[in-house]
Amino acid sequence: MKIAVQENLVPGKDATERWARARDWGFDGLELRGAGGIKSRLPELRAARAAGMVASSICPDGGPFIGAFDPADRQTALTALRDLLDVAAEIGAAGVITPAAYGIHSNRLPPFTTPRPPEDDCAILTEALSALGAHAEKLGVELWLEPLNRYEDHMVNTLAQGAELCRASGNRAVKLMADLFHMNIEEADIAASLRAAGPLVAHLHFADSSRLEPGTGHTDFATALAALPGFTGWGAIECRLSGPPETALPAALAYLRRTP
């Protein structure tokens, strides 16, 4: 498995510097952070790629999201994700991550009544994933749906829920991004959930139960990764750090490399 690190965790003034440092620490790639206007970074990212940067993926940085309650916000999210997919294709990244939404509502925290029924949630997400999946497939990249825990999103919390939406999209370019931090909260058996999702799992995020780097909590990474034999995608470290990046990140990478 190839292991990347999110660029915001690595010191440097631009992607070229961050890539050089991540490479020196032993990482195989950088996961970029992208928001609206990412195309303005293309000169920087082209220069980094020319200098050897390997971009694994792009993770959105802020909203709005495809599951937003406001139709105008959903359209903004679709446009931003199309831009991220365009950039991913140009710089050689494998895919772009999207949650359904982040922080707009939780059924577990007040107010407890969502302003939209679950069947409408499903219809809106399916339509968005279908449209974005068609765009991704045309470009030769993938769109990865990320389930979040119950306190951050009310629509898609488990891999099983995400898999249903991927299939409903009707597009083979729409797959799952499995984040072990969220899975530690939501899945009764992380390994069993990964096995059940199987080939739909295209990308992984690594953060321990503490939300710090792998090796600082109680998540069983070895058992989880053993549930995906032959996995050829990327895993990316996405977390907070327990110490300076120059010590915490190499230690986390070594910990993951030791994981069978």
Image (cartoon, rainbow, N blue to C red):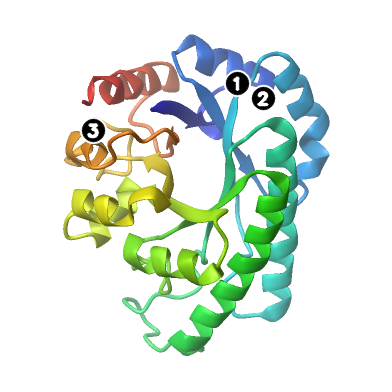
- Residue shown at 59% from the left, 66% from the top: 129
| Numbered badge on residue 255 | none
- Residue shown at 45% from the left, 35% from the top: 233
Residue on which the image places disc 2: 15
Question: From the image, which quarter does the N terminus lie in?
Answer: top left
For badge 3, the amino acid type reads: Thr
Q: Position of residue 22 (x, y in %)?
A: 51, 18
**Element marked by disc 1:** helix
Per the model, the C-alpha gap separating discs 1 and 2 is 5 Å
- Residue shown at 64% from the left, 65% from the top: 64
Q: Position of residue 255 (x, y in %)?
A: 26, 23
Residue on which the image places disc 1: 18
Sooner in the amino-acid sequence: mark 3 or mark 2: 2
Give the quadrant of residue 135: bottom right
- Residue shown at 80% from the left, 43% from the top: 39
**Element marked by disc 2:** helix
For badge 1, the amino acid type reads: Arg
Residue on which the image places disc 3: 216
For the residues labelled 3 and 2, say whether their Cβ atoms are less than 8 Å apart: no
